[in-house]
């Protein structure tokens, strides 16, 4: 039997800065793993349970991959890595 590596999905998540409640999420396009790793400065493969605070430069680069702006001063924006 061959073991299949779990696929990863990367999600931008927004939380209200005042209440810390979840507001929305946007999934980054599949097949961008190498670009995302370069943007984030990762040197090791992700496991599928990580979450990261984003700098403004990282967020701007991820918005380009996403194809839309999600930043808003009212939100704390994070990137999560999940298996599916």
Image: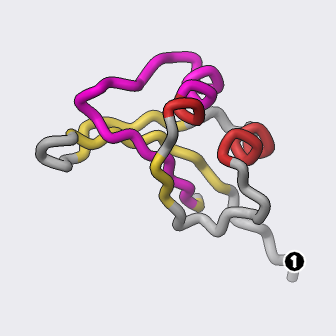
The 10 Å Cα crowd at callout 1, few under 14, some 14 to 19, many 20 or more, is few
Q: Position of residue 4 (x, y in %)?
A: 79, 69
Does 1 appear above or below 54?
below
Q: Quadrant of residue 48?
A: bottom right
For the rendered model, the colour scheme is: secondary structure
Horizontally, is 29 left or right of 12 in the view?
Answer: right
Spot the residue most to the right: 2
Q: Position of residue 81 (x, y in %)?
A: 56, 55
Quadrant (top left, top right, bottom left, bottom right) of the C terminus: bottom right
Image point (21%, 41%), residue name = 17
- Residue highlighted by disc 1: 2
Quadrant (top left, top right, bottom left, bottom right) of the N terminus: bottom right
Q: Quadrant of residue 75?
A: top left
Image point (59%, 61%), residue name = 83
Q: Which segment is the magenta one?
A: 60-82
Image point (23%, 30%), residue name = 74
> Which one is nearer the viewer's eye here, 27 or 37?
37
């Amino acid at each position: 039997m061959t073991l299949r590596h779990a696929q990863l999905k990367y999600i931008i998540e927004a939380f209200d800065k005042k209440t810390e409640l979840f507001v929305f999420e946007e999934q980054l396009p599949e097949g961008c793993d190498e670009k995302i790793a370069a943007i984030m400065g990762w040197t090791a493969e992700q496991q599928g349970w990580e979450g990261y605070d984003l700098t403004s430069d990282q967020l701007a680069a991820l918005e380009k991959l996403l194809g839309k702006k999600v930043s808003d001063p009212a939100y704390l924006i994070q990137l999560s890595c999940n298996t599916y």
